[in-house]
Image (cartoon, grey):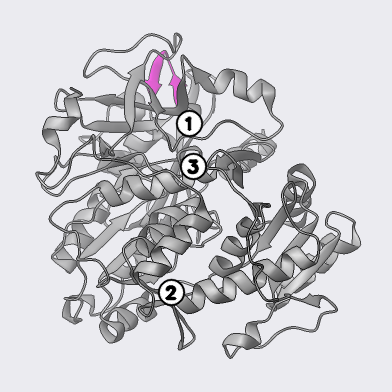
């Protein structure tokens, strides 16, 4: 028995059965169970589960009529509109694999992903920036053809273009045969530190991840078919795709798709739509907590709230939980795990960096940093390693990276952490973020947690910078809350004096209006490290 099993909620078992199949099979199953229930809402337009499947199948047939099938790669360059799930399932139904392009990718990143993945066909919608970049990719030869899924279908407007329309056709009598072992998705990761790598995620990886999420039950779980979910995280990100959209489809939920996050609008929609379920990243929760008069708004419909994508600062989490009167669930995962990993159960320990218990069917352990085949004892810091049916098979066309990514069948995550005697894992930091200062291991995440307690700080990132005496030292980048007075490095060090060790004290401070972030809202320490390296 694993240490964490005794800490599971009474409603849940670690050895619960985990289903493994194909994504079109998954769509067929949920649409048969929830036929006439509403599945998607966007701009006031609602699609039932049956309508979603019927339209997706017509798109799949249209793509097959254009020659798309097994061995092909279809790029989706789509924001949070119904076209994303419709085209995602349609492309997979043909036997092709999918690659996601981020709406925030620069042209160079888009071209790299197109060429590396082997994508020949790109599907986008009529937003001006997407149309412009898609045309550039075609004209540069990075993709052969672009199809337009019209925003006008949902009452929006489409920028001028010369793309062929997204095709539809009558579905065939039989569809191409698929296996759970077939490659479904190339999800690029690591673009903030070097060239992005495509994680190879199979149909089996993604469907087992959904089943793993569904197998986790606790006292916040809602009856099937009752959840109303506000989807603001971008669907081209693995967290929103699997942990939100597919996981909620498995429960027959109604997903309200929105392209952009605005904290005041979030409050209005939670009240008006009686939203029950929302997953955000810490920057969203910071914005929500700062909405004027938030304490007087009616957010009583919320039953399931979680934060992911990056560690939630403890002070921020406590503030949001006071406002909502609700525990913010959390956990940990990676693109490479689809992204199922851990979950913090209601009533679990509260401490900085805690990421919870391994989800059903997933095993985790801590291994020595210099010897990844050797497990570390309870309470000792090392690298987090993981294995399970949701864990990817490797990186696309990256044999050298794959050789070092696994040890004895365990994926080495690059995250450092420790496990307690009850099986709860605590994340210390990314291994690559660790600062070596005067012989000490200094973890930026621990300094950031302390800085977030400062009443003037809205967001912060800590990185290592060269230091003549200590080799490396910590530098803090902070943005301030509206109306907050600036402070100096000495002010900050005085504030931190009884919160962190002397060896962890920032040696430099830079105040900025905004901090760099990814498409999913993560703060990007890597961008700041690159800037500092360029200065040096």
Q: Nearer the viewer, residue 460 or 335?
A: 335
| Residue 64 image offset from top left, x and y in percent | 74, 63
Q: Residue furthest front?
A: 173
Image quadrant holding the N terminus, namely top left
Q: Is residue 342 left or right of residue 87?
A: left
Q: Nearer the viewer, residue 310 or 407?
A: 407
Q: Residue at x 16, y 76 (%)?
A: 300
Q: Residue at x 80, y 60 (%)?
A: 67
| Residue 195 image offset from top left, x and y in percent | 69, 38
Label placed on residue 204: 3
Q: Is residue 312 at least partly visible in the picture? A: no
Q: Nearer the viewer, residue 217 or 100?
A: 217
| Residue 436 image offset from top left, x and y in percent | 46, 20
Q: Earlier in the sequence, mark 2 or mark 3?
A: 2
Find numbered disc 2 in the image and state the secondary structure of the residue it sits on: helix
Q: Earlier in the sequence, mark 1 or mark 2?
A: 2
């Amino acid at each position: 028995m694993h240490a964490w099993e005794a800490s599971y909620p009474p409603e849940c078992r670690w050895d619960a059965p985990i289903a493994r199949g194909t994504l079109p099979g998954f769509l067929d199953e949920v649409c048969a169970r929830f036929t006439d229930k509403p599945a998607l809402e966007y701009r006031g337009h609602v699609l039932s589960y049956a309508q979603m499947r019927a339209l997706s199948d017509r798109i799949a047939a249209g793509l097959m009529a254009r020659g798309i099938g097994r061995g092909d790669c279809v790029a989706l360059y789509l924001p949070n509109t119904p076209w994303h799930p419709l085209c995602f399932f349609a492309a997979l139904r043909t036997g092709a694999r999918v690659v996601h392009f981020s709406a925030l990718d620069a042209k160079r990143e888009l071209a790299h992903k197109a060429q590396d993945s082997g994508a020949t066909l790109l599907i986008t919608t009529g937003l001006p920036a997407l149309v412009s970049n898609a045309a550039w990719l075609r004209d540069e030869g990075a993709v052969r053809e672009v199809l337009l899924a019209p925003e006008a279908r949902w009452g929006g407007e489409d920028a001028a273009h010369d793309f062929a329309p997204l095709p539809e056709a009558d579905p065939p009598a039989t569809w191409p045969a698929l296996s759970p072992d077939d490659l479904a998705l190339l999800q690029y990761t690591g673009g903030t530190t070097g060239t992005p790598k495509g994680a190879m995620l199979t149909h089996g990886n993604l469907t087992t991840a959904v089943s793993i999420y569904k197998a986790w039950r606790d006292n916040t779980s809602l009856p099937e078919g009752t959840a109303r979910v506000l989807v603001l995280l971008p669907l081209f990100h693995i967290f929103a795709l699997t942990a939100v959209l597919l996981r909620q489809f498995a429960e027959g939920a109604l997903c309200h798709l929105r392209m952009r996050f605005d904290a005041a609008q979030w409050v209005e929609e939670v009240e008006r739509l009686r939203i029950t379920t929302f997953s955000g990243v810490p920057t969203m929760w910071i914005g929500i907590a700062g909405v004027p008069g938030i304490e007087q708004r009616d957010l009583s419909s919320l039953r399931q709230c979680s934060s992911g994508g990056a560690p939630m600062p403890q002070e921020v989490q406590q503030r949001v939980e006071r406002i909502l009167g609700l525990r913010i669930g959390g956990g940990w995962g990676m693109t490479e795990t689809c992204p199922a990993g851990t979950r913090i159960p209601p009533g679990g320990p509260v401490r900085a960096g805690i990421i919870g218990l391994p989800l059903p069917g997933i095993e985790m352990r801590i291994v020595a940093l210099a010897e990844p085949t050797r497990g570390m004892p309870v309470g000792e810091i090392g690298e987090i390693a993981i294995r399970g049916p949701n864990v990817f098979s490797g990186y696309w066309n990256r044999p050298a990276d794959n050789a070092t990514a696994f040890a004895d069948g365990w994926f080495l995550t690059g995250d450092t952490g420790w496990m307690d005697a009850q099986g709860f894992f605590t994340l210390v930091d990314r291994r690559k973020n660790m600062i070596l200062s005067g012989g000490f291991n200094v973890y930026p995440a621990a300094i950031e947690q302390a800085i977030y307690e400062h009443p003037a700080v809205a967001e912060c990132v800590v990185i290592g910078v060269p230091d003549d005496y200590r080799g490396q030292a910590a530098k803090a980048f902070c943005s301030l809350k509206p109306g907050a007075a600036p402070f100096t490095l000495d002010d900050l060090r005085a504030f931190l004096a009884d919160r962190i060790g002397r060896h962890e004290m920032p040696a430099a401070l830079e105040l900025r209006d905004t901090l760099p972030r990814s498409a999913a809202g993560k703060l990007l320490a890597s961008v700041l490290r690159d800037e500092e390296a360029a200065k040096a």
